[in-house]
Amino acid sequence: MKLPLNKVLAKLDRPPAGHNWARLVDDSVAATTKSIVAFAKGMPKFNYQTGTSAVRDRLLFGIGEDSAVSVTRRSGAPAGRSQNEELVRAFFEYDATRRYPIGTCIEFERQWFRISREILVPVSPLVIVREKGRFVPIFLCGWSELALNEAQRRLLMTIYDDAFLSLTDFQDSPAEFLFFPKTKDRDGKKRQPEVWGRSDYRLLTPRELQEQVEIYLEARSQAQLFLIAEDKREREVDVAAPEPTQAPIQPDLFLHNPEDK
């Protein structure tokens, strides 16, 4: 099923959340345009909403692993239930040694990284826990493959810092960025924790960040033109397509010829 043009173009005005947006921005306008077009036209079969919600409920209310897994098995798109379950189980395995404090989360508001006056990238942690007298924002990404290159990782950390961690309450806070990509082990592929801290990647300079934003904005403009032109070509092909010809009416062989009478 193909999305109508108006819905495809609307996605260009509503960028995805921080980690998904950083994945769109490549080292050239052409490569970024390709990524944006794929995003705009794409219709993912599932997302990680049920898995992340289950992890959030663990940190907020202390639900157990069985209850968290149950959430992923009964909710969300069927195509993604096993992937969400794997994410939840990987988190619980990691937390068995990390031991996040339960029930200490504080409220917060979603923040935005501003690309332009109209275009904003949503940025927010999964939760913020209070640990040892400090606030610790915890960001979670459910991907099974962590395919960000070095520049994209620096961009992601920079927009997290710019939009959220630079707020007064969190300027001196630690923060954790959780990923659970699948890696090979003796039994095949299994999700393993990859945890970033605030200082693990050098932030982009203001000039470098502006360059990345400019690449994205130019690529977005080119993607918009491409999508409009593509839709126009497809409609012209549909109009030009010949209508199916009607088969000639065959005489009924069982009708009597009046001359036979």
Image (cartoon, rainbow, N blue to C red):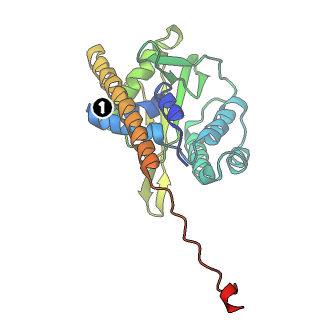
Answer yes or no: is residue 200 visible. Answer: no
Residue 255 vertical position relative to residue 53 in the rendered view, above or below: below
Q: Residue furthest bottom?
A: 260
Question: In the image, residue 125 lies at what x, y percent?
Answer: 55, 26
How many marks on residues?
Answer: 1
Q: Nearer the viewer, residue 251 or 149?
A: 251
- Per the image, the residue denoted by label 1 is 151
Answer yes or no: is residue 89 visible. Answer: yes
Question: In the image, residue 25 lies at what x, y percent?
Answer: 35, 31
Q: Nearer the viewer, residue 102 or 50?
A: 50
Judging from the image, what secondary structure is the residue with disc 1 in? helix
Whether residue 27 sits left or right of residue 120 in the image: it is left
> Residue drawn at (54%, 28%), measured in percent from left and top?
138
> Residue drawn at (59%, 77%), measured in percent from left and top?
250
* Mark 1 nearby-residue class (10 Å; few <14, some 14–19, many ≥20): some
The residue type indicated by label 1 comes to Ala
> Residue drawn at (31%, 19%), measured in percent from left and top?
209
Question: In the image, residue 244 lies at what x, y percent?
Answer: 51, 61
Question: In the image, residue 135 lies at what x, y percent?
Answer: 56, 18
> Residue drawn at (55%, 17%), measured in percent from left and top?
134
Whether residue 33 sits left or right of residue 135 in the image: it is left
State the image quarter where residue 204 is shown: top left
